[in-house]
Image (tube, rainbow, N blue to C red):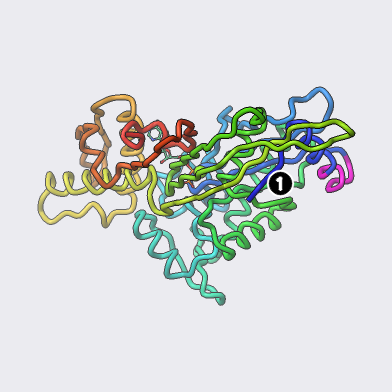
């Protein structure tokens, strides 16, 4: 796949494209909807504004939890949903992006493997619908994702201080046609006009090359992104060719994605789940009497929340405490984790990068030291 992007060329192309696509001068946004986090950026067209900027949320964070919850007739999105996620794990829907284009059975398995206690029913398409806490209202994955995308659109609008309808949405390389259709349908439900779906690695490559000049040096670059539930590595070749533009000879950058490999089931949450299993066993052993904490969704949600914190502390420290008050049956749980416990050989990601000095790390798990060993 090749793309042209001399800095001047791309601005012209983008500008012409945007002017043709939108009747009035208004902003366009890009949305990276991950399985755990959503990131929104705005392409501004108004004079005096910076061309591209990240839309922050109401608590000034550059990424928002991709969650939607229903509690007592209220719909809660992102940070509002996080607040009740440990107390009401059955009311807070996570990983909805990964439910798009999946069968009912696949979604049930996904929820079970993550200890997500959802009331999942099969719809007429054979896909999964989720019942909310009132026991009557049912939403399909497209509807749940649309609520999160709508929140993203509102973040972009309040950042740009103008209405936004058009968006470019990133999708992981392993998304098939069914998942891509699901994202487009969800966007349409959110009133978003999808200008394009772009593979995450192509978006990253475009951003990497946009302000560089490859006329004197072509190069291979590896983009490596380990997120919450997936990992990919893409090998991209950047080079330049010359052409005539308005009678002048100009150098035009291009990139070619040579290869992309992924594991759609390995990421930060995989590490968390390992730790959760480890501590669940430890707690069961401590309590004895055949107690199995795994049967209590609330206890598992509390444990997962604390484990996530511990995991993140372990990225910067060799040991971290884990402390959960009233984890189960009014019993507190305290334990300690060391970095060596949380890594294991099969979690190491090794890449042969002979003659490849350029590597770009993306994704939240770049903070974990042993994934980069
Ligand atoms: N300091 C940290 N230490 C360890 N893990 C971290 C840290 N910061 C973020 N993470 C992990 O990174 C993951 C989130 O990464 P990212 O924001 O790239 O996810 P995502 O884009 O939603 O996921 P995906 O791309 O797999 O759909 C989570 O598992 C989170 O725990
Ligand atoms: Mg991601």
* Residue 192 seen anywhere in this rendered image of the structure: no
Side (left or right) of 224 relative to 124: left
- Going by the picture, which residue comes out furthest to the top? 48
245 over 34 or under it: above or below: above
All told, the count of numbered labels is 1
Q: Give how far across and how far down residue 338 sits, in percent.
A: 21, 32
Looking at this view, is 53 or 207 the one in front?
207
Name the residue: 54% across, 58% down.
175
Quadrant location, the C terminus = top left
Q: Which residue is mark 1?
A: 167
Residue pictured at 43% horizontal, 54% vertical: 264
Could you tell whether 282 is left or right of 90 in the image?
left
Q: Main secondary structure of the magenta part?
A: helix
Q: Nearer the viewer, residue 270 or 352?
A: 352
Query: Which residue shows up at 67% across the image and 30% down it?
Result: 215
Secondary structure state at the residue bearing disc 1: strand
* Circle 1 crowding by C-alpha within 10 Å: few under 14, some 14–19, many from 20: many
Q: Could you tell whether 165 is left or right of 99 in the image?
A: right
Name the residue furthest left. 289
Residue 356, quarter of picture: top left
Membership of 251 in magenta stretch: no
Q: Kindly identify the residue that appears in the image at 52 percent across and 70 percent down.
A: 127
Residue 160 percent across, percent down from the top left: 75, 32
Q: Nearer the viewer, residue 371 or 67?
A: 371
Residue bounds of the magenta highlight:
17-24
Per the image, is 18 magenta?
yes
Q: Position of residue 135 (x, y in %)?
A: 49, 64
**Residue 86 at x, y = what percent?**
39, 44
Locate ligand 1 by image quadrant.
top left
Q: Is residue 142 visible?
A: yes
Vertical relation: 58 (above or below) 81: above
């Amino acid at each position: 796949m090749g793309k042209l992007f001399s800095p001047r060329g791309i601005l012209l192309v983008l500008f012409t494209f945007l002017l043709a696509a939108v009747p009035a001068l208004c902003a366009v946004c890009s949305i990276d909807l991950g399985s755990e986090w959503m990131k929104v950026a705005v392409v501004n067209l108004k004079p005096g504004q910076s061309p591209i900027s990240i839309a922050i949320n109401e608590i000034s964070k550059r990424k928002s939890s991709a969650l939607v919850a229903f509690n007592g007739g209220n719909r809660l999105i992102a940070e509002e949903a996080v607040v009740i996620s440990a107390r009401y794990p059955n009311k807070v829907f996570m990983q909805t992006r990964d439910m798009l284009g999946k069968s009912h059975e696949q979604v049930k398995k996904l929820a079970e493997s993550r200890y997500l206690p959802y009331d999942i029913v099969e719809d007429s398409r054979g896909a999964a619908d989720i019942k909310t806490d009132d026991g009557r209202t049912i939403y399909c994955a497209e509807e749940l994702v649309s609520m999160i995308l709508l929140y993203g659109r509102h973040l972009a609008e309040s950042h740009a201080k103008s209405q936004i309808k058009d968006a470019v949405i990133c999708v992981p390389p392993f998304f098939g046609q069914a998942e891509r259709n699901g994202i487009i349908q969800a966007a349409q439900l959110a009133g978003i006009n999808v200008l394009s779906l772009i593979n995450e690695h192509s978006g990253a490559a475009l951003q990497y090359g946009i302000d560089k000049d490859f006329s004197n040096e072509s190069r291979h670059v590896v983009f490596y992104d380990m997120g919450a539930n997936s990992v990919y590595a893409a090998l991209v070749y950047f080079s330049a060719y010359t052409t005539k533009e308005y009678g002048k000879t100009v150098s035009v950058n291009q990139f070619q994605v040579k290869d992309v490999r992924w594991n759609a089931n390995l990421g930060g949450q995989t590490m968390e789940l390992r730790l959760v299993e480890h501590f669940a066993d430890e707690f069961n052993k401590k309590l004895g009497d055949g107690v199995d904490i795994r049967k209590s969704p609330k206890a598992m949600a509390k444990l997962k929340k604390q484990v996530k914190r511990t995991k993140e502390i372990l990225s910067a420290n060799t040991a971290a405490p884990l402390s959960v008050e009233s984890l189960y049956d009014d019993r507190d749980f305290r334990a300690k984790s060391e970095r060596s416990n949380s890594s294991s050989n099969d979690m190491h990601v090794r890449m042969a990068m002979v003659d490849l000095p350029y590597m770009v790390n993306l994704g939240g798990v770049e903070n974990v030291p042993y994934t980069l060993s």
